Amino acid sequence: MVLWIGVDDTDSLQGMCTTFLAAEIVRELTEDYDLIGFPRLVRLNPNVPWKTRGNGAICLRFGRGTGRRNLIGELESQPVWSFARAEGVDDPERVQSRIANLVERRSEFREPTTNPGFCILSKQPAATLYWKAVRRIVSKEEALAAVRSPGVLREYKNGRGIIGSLAAAAWRPHDRTYEVLCYRDESRWRTPRLLESGSVRYMDRTFTSTFNNYDYECNRIVIAPHSPCPILFGIRGDDPGVLPSAMRTIKGEPAAGWMVFETNQGTDDHVIPGQAVEPKTTVQVEREVSGRPRSIRGGHVVVELNDLEAAAYEPSKGFRTVVRALRPGDRVRVVGSIRDQPRTLNIEKLQVLSLSEESHKLANPLCFKCQKRAKSMGRKAGFRCARCGQRFPASSAITEHVSRPLEPGWYEPPVGSRRHLSKPLSRRPARSGRLGAA
């Protein structure tokens, strides 16, 4: 049996990071216990209005390890070993004071939006809690109802952190990725990070199982956070075995320690399938484009999808070109979050399913009797010869086919504009589309 330890909501925009607290817990508890499996970084609903940054919680498992051990990190120059399995039984109460001490010492209690919580359980909460928390808004009562074993539940301030703590412990991966997180020396916190961009690009090209490393469109590093937190950088990928090697190719500020996390990042777990549109959720819907895209103040692009307005915002940069290229009659599948007021789908990525035919009018139809061009009677009203009065349908105009710059396939924003949970196209088996010359 293992002890399931979940922690959430210890950070703020001014500092700290819950994944740094994970390293502190590992350093503390591995004096007496073994780490079981990878530490887990579990992202929850990105549409929660009170989230700090990426709405991430952590889950760590400790016990008496059996079998082969694996190196998954290094803290204070000491290796961090992990075991795949555990044996024996332990009491969650035994480590309560040690976890509480770390949470109370490291959490940003001065920030009004920081409301820590942690759990120590002998069994995972119900799996349904994770799926609710990654896709919708969960109440504290719902989270507590998912607990299925005796244990420790500790709340601070309004106690909202207990929701994420339990949801992280409830995660049973269907899909998973990994991230090696490198920590800064505490003397460097709140100072600019020093990373060589060329080494990041080299790592990105060399280790092809990694993703979301460098934004080539905006020419900037994506692996380093912008907040004054203890994280130096993090590299995400599908193969945990190559992440330490990828980490070592990055040049610049030396890391004070590192650990590989198992995560739900890049999995699309937050996306609700189906056509229902509910505020503060992320959905995947199929729609027909019903109006020509338009640009609005701020550089954003908006397109009508029958009963739903979808937007590509300015930070998505070149992705807006894809949205601008849509035309009425195109059929698309769109993934995005639903904003309540005004009701808008904020596009995370889209798939062009089919393209409508587009043509350009060259001339009005010719009246063969009078040998003159007919006159338009108005939009979609057809044409009429001004001399003899003969009428012609709107379809009789002389047109030429216009080639479309789009082709069917998936399209996504540049790396720097993607959400943590959004599955990059590099992890999708489906073919990506291509934006050609207009």
Image (cartoon, rainbow, N blue to C red):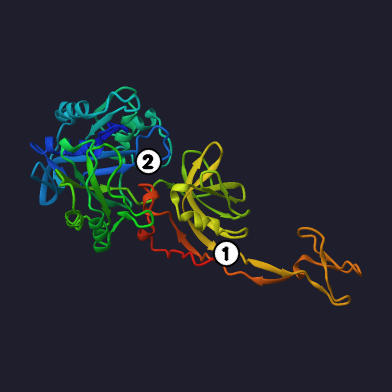
Quarter holding the C terminus?
bottom right
> Relative to residue 60, is residue 68 drawn left or right?
left
Residue depicted at x 52% and y 61%:
352
Question: Which amino acid lies under the numbered mark 1 shown in the image of this protein?
Answer: Leu
The percent position of residue 267, horizontal first and vertical second, equals: 36, 51
Q: Classify mark 2: residues with Cα within 10 Å, few (<14), some (14-19) or many (20+).
A: some
Residue indicated by mark 1: 355
**Rendered view: 51 above or below 274:** above
Q: Nearer the viewer, residue 330 or 302?
A: 302
Residue 431 located left or right of residue 331: left
- How packed mark 1 is, by other alpha carbons closer than 10 Å (few <14, some 14-19, many 20 or more), is some
Label 1 element class: loop
Asked whether the viewer can see residue 1, the reply is no
Which quarter shows the N terminus?
Answer: top left
Left or right of 11, for residue 133 = right
Q: Please tell me which residue lies in front, 155 or 46.
A: 46
Query: Real-space Cα distance between discs 2 and 1?
Result: 39 Å
Q: Quadrant of residue 244?
A: bottom left
Q: Which residue does the image show at 42% across and 34% down from the upper left? A: 49
Among numbered discs 2 and 1, the one appearing first in the sequence: 2
Residue 111: in sight, yes or no?
yes
Q: Secondary structure at mark 2?
A: helix
Q: Which residue does the numbered mark 2 point to in the structure image?
A: 128
Q: Position of residue 47 (x, y in %)?
A: 43, 39
The amino acid type, in three-letter code, at marker 2 is Thr
- Using the rendered view, name the quadrant where residue 288 is placed: bottom right
